[in-house]
Amino acid sequence: MKTIKLNICKLEANQEWLCLDSMAYITECLEACVCADMLADLREIFPRQALTVASVKVCELQRKRIQKWLKEMNGEVQNLDEPPQVLQNATDPCLDKCSS
């Protein structure tokens, strides 16, 4: 196990962050996460409240994955023993970030 430093967005979620279009986009980003590193990147970009609100719309299986990754990150420990979970038929080039 390796300890990692986390950078979390300090912005407050205003109405622009919480509007339907923004929530739909953030939900898509959460659904696209295939590893804790990708989730950590989203935590750097989006305000915490916006991620929390959007996470309610994520499918149950992905929400469980996200909860597991959050537990790992909040403990500032990343489990390097498990290979990243890759979505079938994924064509997004940013998915390569966690597969190498």
Image: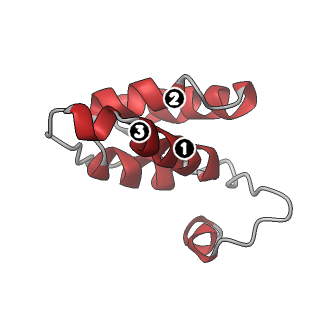
Q: Secondary structure at mark 1?
A: helix
Considering the image in quadrants, where does the C terminus appear?
A: bottom right
Q: Secondary structure at mark 2?
A: helix
Of 98 and 19, the residue lying toward us? 19
Crowd band around label 2 with a 10 angstrom C-alpha radius: few (<14), some (14–19), many (20+)? many
Of 33 and 82, the residue lying toward us? 33
Query: How many marks do you count on the picture?
Result: 3
**Residue 89 in sight:** yes
Crowd band around label 1 with a 10 angstrom C-alpha radius: few (<14), some (14–19), many (20+)? many
Query: With 75 as the anchor, is 26 left or right in this view?
Result: right
Task: Give me the residue at 39% from left, 50% from top.
Answer: 42
Task: Give me the residue at 34% from left, 37% from top.
Answer: 76
The earlier-in-sequence mark between 2 and 1 is 1
Reply above or below: 56 against 84.
above
* Residue designated by label 1: 30
Q: Are marks 2 and 1 in contact (CB under 8 Å)?
A: yes
* Residue designated by label 3: 77
The picture places residue 87, in percent across and down from the top left corner, at 78, 56
Task: Give me the residue at 41% from left, 39% from top.
Answer: 77
Q: Mark on residue 55?
A: 2
The picture places residue 13, in percent across and down from the top left corner, at 22, 33
